[in-house]
Image: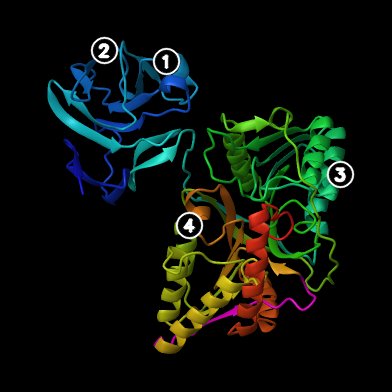
Amino acid sequence: MPVSRHRHVRALAVVLVVVVAGRIQSVAVAAPADGTPALVAAVPNPVADGDTGEFVVVRIPESSTANWTLGDGETTIELPADRPGGRIAVTADPNATRRLTDTPILAVPRLSLSNEGERLRLRRAGVVVDRLAYRDAPSGERLVDGSDGRRWQPVGFQPRDVRSHGRAPVTGFLLPDSPGVPVETLRDARRRILLAGYTFTSDRIADALVAAERRGVAVRVLVDGDPVGGRSARGAATLDRLAEAGIEVAVLGGPRARFEYHHPKYAVVDDRALVTSENWKPSGVGGRSSRGWGVVVDSRAVADDLAGLFRADAGWHDAIPWRRYRRGRSFDPGRPANGSYPSRFDPATATGTVRVLTAPGNAESAVVEVIDTADERVDVIQPSIGRRDGPLLRATVRAAARGVRVRVLLSGAWYVAEENAALVEWLNGVAERRGLPLSARVAEPRGRFEKIHTKGVVADDVVVVGSLNWNANAVSDNREVAVAVRSDELAAYFREAFAADWERGVGRGTWVLVAGAAAALVLALLVAKKTIRFDDSSD
């Protein structure tokens, strides 16, 4: 297994990088100081014919701009001394590179990076001060030097830190109990609506957006370009209607996509932020099917934060105008959810401190921290959970090991029934063998909703609400948004709702295994025919 060491001279920092299966994985990290000379990033394989626009980002101190070279063992490029210090993008094709980075450009006569691999060296007066090595450069990605090591990221993606915004009034609500909350929030808009989602088929939400546009509100919509199962004709017609009303509608995807899926569910409405676990469709915010959680945060700081995120996500080459994207495409008929469920929990308003979490980047570690700092109780509600050794589930078991009372509630929907029943059996078995205060159940709605679609955590006085599924793809590949609200009153509200759903759950899930086996057979047949759809049954 080849090993490459990268020494940052004068900072005495060492980064150890291991190449595994052609990709770089960091093993131990000590990030260089901002003023330290370094090879910061490389884009060897842009999504372009002939790799036009490929570049290397170097960082050179302002105080010493002379006698620097960049080489790969075959070719050495002298970096001109009459240029500013700091970060610069070295490229032979400045016009193409400007479309890929905001870093100041330094044009050089020749720079050719192999997609199969390079060993780059940054030298000062002939002395190597930094190295960067890679193998098998992925298309449309850049190798970056960050606080967590050198790794590949999509070109155009900028990771964010957790954003903390102080105290604000927050209204918590449940779905399908209170579908009026998201609609009324949008109807109250006077200046701006920025709506981000995965899928969009709701006529009620579309009505609110069109009405807002007509009264002069600036409305923009951003959804995923290729959701699982494809886009339904109903969804296409809904987006057509928005675009025809003059609303700026874009979809995220294509060969330059920064994310596997654009999966958040939030809206910026004037100086408020609406964040939910539910899609913009009848089964979600329409209250026709799913158990979901949501919050409305009355805070200009939170709203502006999410507005900045929206602009960043909608401002790259993978954001494609809907009218252009839909040309020549056909869409399958969809079947919207038509359920009707009684309202049991009214919305509740309290004051709490708010943090904005996003993925890729910080959401997983932030939720792990929330669970790790709990002293008394942790309640987790998820449609399903991926790997049993994932950081989020490990944190949950770890909390129980230190005496925290932990409950995990999962969906009993047919498409996750078998795996969820197996996980419930395993978690309860771990608890029994180790004597932990941990229990898990599969939800049984019994007429109160159709399925669990919530992605939520209540840990002591903190509640986490948003789109973050507990699987590896969500935390590392998808755009996800959640908020963590610290409030005794709001935590009590969501914990009471959790307890009501918990009491109707199934602890061992034997019947679910049988149902899951039957569902798996149906699923296999549907997949064979390539007709399976997830429009209203899942994400």
- Cα–Cα span, label 3 and label 4: 36 Å
- Residue at 81% x, 41% y is 238
**What's drawn in magenta, residue-wise?**
434-449
Cα–Cα span, label 1 and label 4: 36 Å
What secondary structure is marked by label 1? helix
Which dot marks residue 143? none
Tell me the amino acid under the disc marked 2.
Answer: Pro
Give the amino acid at mark 3. Asp
Q: Which mark is residue 207?
A: 3
Q: Give the labeled residue for mark 4.
A: 472
Q: Is label 3 in a helix, a strand or a loop?
A: helix
Name the mark on residue 80. Answer: 2
Taking the magenta stretch, the answer to whether it contains residue 436 is yes
**Counting other residues with Cα less than 10 Å from the Cα at mark 3, is it few (<14), some (14-19), or many (20 or more)?**
some
The residue tagged 1 is: 94
Position of residue 223 measured from the top left corner of the image (x, y, whole percent)? 67, 42
